[in-house]
Image (cartoon, grey):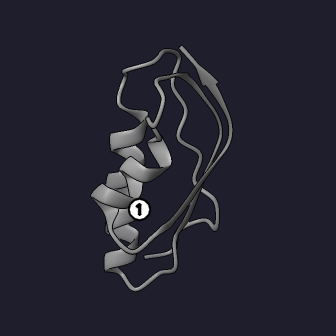
Amino acid sequence: MNLPGIILVTGTDTGVGKTITTAALAAVLRGTGRSVAVYKPCQSGAADGDSDAAEIVRLAGDVTAETGIVLQE
């Protein structure tokens, strides 16, 4: 499979499935033997201890995931 080095997942609202979609893509790519890193530049509406990056790792497995800025609720 010939995929680009970077895949951008974007959405227009919170709760529309960006994190789940990203985790699914990461898991599929890891399944092909690729090294996967996820970077979320900004997470908004986060509660204390709520991390989309941690959720992606939990769902996708052996991937690296980081968040830049976290804006609390």
Classify mark 1: residues with Cα within 10 Å, few (<14), some (14-19) or many (20+): many
Where is mark 1, residue-wise? 26
Q: Amino acid at mark 1?
A: Ala
Which image quarter: residue 72?
top right
Query: In the image, what residue occupies the spot 41% across and 62% down?
Result: 26
Closer to us: 56 or 51: 51
Query: In the image, what residue occupies the spot 39% across and 60% down?
Result: 57
Query: In the image, what residue occupies the spot 46% across and 24% down?
Result: 47
Closer to us: 62 or 50: 50
Residue 59 in the figure: left or right of residue 5: left
Q: Is residue 68 positioned above or below 58 on the image?
A: above
Which image quarter: residue 4?
bottom right
Question: Residue 44's spot in the image, x, y percent?
Answer: 58, 22
Outermost residue, bottom direction? 33
Q: Is residue 19 positioned above or below 71 on the image?
A: below
The quadrant the N terminus occupies is bottom left
Outermost residue, front direction? 48
How many discs mark residues in the rendered view?
A: 1
Query: In the image, what residue occupies the spot 49% across and 49% down?
Result: 53
Residue 45 in the figure: left or right of residue 15: right
Question: Residue 55's spot in the image, x, y percent?
Answer: 37, 48
Residue 25 in the figure: left or right of residue 39: left
Question: Residue 25's spot in the image, x, y percent?
Answer: 38, 57
Question: Residue 8's spot in the image, x, y percent?
Answer: 59, 46
- What kind of element bears circle 1? helix
